[in-house]
Amino acid sequence: MLDILLPILIFSALALAAIGAVRRIRLWRQGRPSPVPVLRGLAAVPRRYLVDLHHVVARDKVMSNTHVATAGGFVAAMGLAIVVHGLGLAEGVLGWLLLAASATMFAGSLFVAQRRRNPPARLSKGPWMRLPKSLMAFSLGIFVVTLPAVGVLPADAGGWLVALVLAAVVAWGLAELVFGMTWGGPMKHAFAGALHLAFHRRPERFSDKRGGEGRSTGLKALDLEDDQAPLGVETPADFTWNQLLGFDACVQCGRCEAVCPAFAAGQPLNPKKLIQDMVVGMAGGSDAHYAGSPYPSPERGDKPVGEHHGTPHGPIVAREGTALVDAETLWSCTTCRACVEECPMMIEHVDAIVDMRRHLTLEEGATPGKGAEVIDNLIATDNPGGFDPGGRLNWAADLDLPLMADVERAEVLLWLGDGVFDMRNQRTLRALIKVLRAADVDFAVLGNEERDSGDVARRLGDEATFQSLARRNIATLSRYRFESIVTCDPHSFHVLKNEYGALYPQGQDADYPVWHHSTFINQLIESGRLPLAPGQAQRVTYHDPCYLGRYNGEYEAPRAVLRALGVELVEMQRSGYRSRCCGGGGGAPITDVPGKQRIPDMRMGDVRETQAEQVVVGCPQCTAMLEGVVPPAGNEATAVKDIAEMVAAALDNTPPATPASHDAAASQATEEVLS
Amino acid sequence: MQPESAMTPALEVTVLVSIGRHPLTGRVRRADQDARGVELARSLADAEVRLLHAGECNESSEAALRGYLGMGFSELALIEQPEGADVLPALSEALDATSPHLVITGERAERGEGSGLLPYLLAERLGWPLVSGLAAVESVEDGMATLLQALPRGQRRRLKIRLPAIVTVDDAAPTPRQSAYGPARRGTLETSAGEVCNDDEWATWQVQPARPRPKRLKIVKAASARDRFKAAAAKAEGTGGQVLTDVTPTQGAEAILTLLRDEEVLR
């Protein structure tokens, strides 16, 4: 009896899965076109899965092994079951292999069940709670029905009642694991995830055989020349189809939620819920079936689910009332990329958030908080503070900095950034210049020709202002000759290095390396150009800026510099690629969405745990955010020092004093300021 | 220029917008007070708001005018005028033709002459009442508008005025909304040629950048914190004068005439 039932079950499950797949693909195809190499993408799946995806999953060893056993066992068991039971080819070793595969899968599913007994808050419940049972049903069912096939049990063992029960168990397993894959159950992640790996919007983020580390973090440029192209994303269908596919791949593991600084601060953002909301919008409906942690809400504790709903062609953010997502959710993001770094399904949360912000800013003029004012300042004065652009070098009136306009060529172009208007950052800049002079580096600055890099404008969704600033900066840069750019602002560093390239006029290239000052100082130390004093006896910790670490993979150079200084370096629990954001990125201090606590307060809490005397940073934003933290009563304030200040303090010989002569360079910088 | 007569909304509002100039960098922009005027107009219920500008049409002025379109307008009426022309005749002709109920404008332009006289001259030419320094329009009913005029130190004066009228906005008017790139790019400038009246007097003027004068130190002789606060928050305030209440229009007009003679404004 089973040998009649099983082929019917297996092939009908496969047929239903195929129908479901077509429906699912139709949902994704609602998105805007995005050309992908189909065959090359599919061919790349095994490597992307086994190397890049596994690299992320393996950060949790137990779950990684569980997944290998369960998923590997399932793929093998399903393939063999089609041959053994579907086609009736049980001869020889095949049946035994099937037994082994289903046993492995059963062992894995026991770990899955263990995991689900007291699941951490980040895991979604709901249908996910039945998954271990379904896995067991499939593996056990297949195991038992295979026993007669290899001759361990007689073919008619147990009679027809047992056969019916077994068939029902196998049918349950097949329903969840085969056609559940395409009809939207928990196993959807396997189908959508595999295709997402194949057709990822950023294929360059995957490693390659030649040892390329695979990093793609620059935001994609909007085509502003084309006045038919939508300015950002208004409806779920405005995403490209492979972005929608990516959202559908989410396995709701909640790793993003666990690392999101905004979620931890009680701001109304949960990356996992955001991605699920996009899936709800793509399919149409309400978020009532969502079974994970909701968006926090400072007033209500949590935002209840079921109040938001959307359609593929309806707005994501309502102008009035509620739609799929509230605007404050999108503006809570600090673009720190912690979620993207942790996501085992390679979903690009930050791209999606900035896409939706672009619509809010460019089409609706709805940048919250001080956003509109900052953008207006950037348009009118080329800096976010609205300062006189003629006063960019006022802080350096006594330093006699060589201007590019005068020297025209230099070894290093020192990009100062908007920190020139900030008195705290001016100390960092002075330290950096002291270091460069001590190492006898031939450098020059752009002075008043420099503009804001456009980082803040772009993260606030104002692509037009970003491109305007970028194009003018590019025109300035291409007038001068230099070997590299050095900057102490990781945001400028990232934008210059990764985002300006797409905006160069045709036939021109950004043909210079860009260095963060920590990398450059490390190069100076390693090449022996920087004579350093013997070690300082200090206990310090280092805070990785998001835009230097996760965005650009530079974790090592700042630590090497600190080692060269001889200080005692203690790491925070969350450091390196898991470093927690200071709360200063993505325009978050400008939009200032309220939460239960502040992100920099939490970060300084991390610092205090290490009992370090100082926290070393490499970013003007981090300095400002962390220095603004008031220590709790009874605690002494921990000093916040830029790495350039640390090095400058350690220089054993002061550089030759600069004469206090006010020549052309200095006097140009101190033009009269209207006030 | 004629409004579409098919569907006449309750209130037709025209906002006169000019090309602004950023105080630090001198770049063109939407003028701050005019943008506040636009915001005020947008906040009126059932109003059909029209934007009107008279001036040169070139690349830089277009960029500034698109700043107003970005506040959510699909078009802006532009009466082309050569540089240095007196835009008064062209504007009054256009307003005469469209006959809006309410004309809103800033107090003075950020570029050019910037004398702040245009609203007054326009009101005189059209024979409409004028209210200056508006903080809000409270309501419009039966051809009467209730306005809130901004006075120094946060005081407000409620006025009732018969429409059509011209009003100018104060810095106390609502902050203008963000100008969005999309609508600004899509909106159209409906250009038309207007009556050109060359300002011969202006042509002979010599214009040079103002030199920032040193600020006079404000010496506050205050005994209490309240006095110091009042001094810090004070706007320029007129002294003397008299308040006339319950007088006939004739008596009021005579009092004004007497004052103007005393002050030798009229001889």
Image (spheres, rainbow, N blue to C red):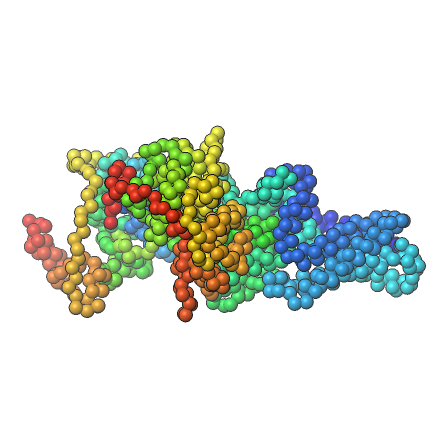
Q: Is residue B84 visible?
A: yes
Residue situated in front as seen by the camera: A552 or A262: A552
The picture places residue B99, in percent across and down from the top left corner, at 30, 47
Q: Horizontal placement of A470 versus A169: left or right?
A: left
The vertical placement of A492 against A607, above or below, is above
- Please say whether residue A321 is visible from this viewpoint: no
Q: How many marks?
A: 0
Between B212 and A21, which is closer to the camera in this rendering?
B212
- The front one of A643 and B8 is A643
Q: Position of residue A404 (x, y in %)?
A: 35, 35
In what quadrant of the picture does the N terminus of chain A appear? bottom right
x 43%, y 40%: residue: A529
Residue B165 shown left or right of residue A169 in the figure:
left
Q: Residue at x 50, y 48 (%)?
A: A560
Q: Residue at x 93, y 59 (%)?
A: A154
Image position of A281 (left or right of A668): right
**Residue A219 x/y as whole percent:** 51, 44
Q: Quadrant of residue A293?
A: bottom right
| Residue A413 coordinates in the image, percent (x, y) | 40, 38
Residue at x 35% of width, y 56% of height:
B44
Q: Quadrant of residue A521?
A: top left
Residue at the extreme top: A507
Q: Is residue B147 left or right of residue A542?
A: left
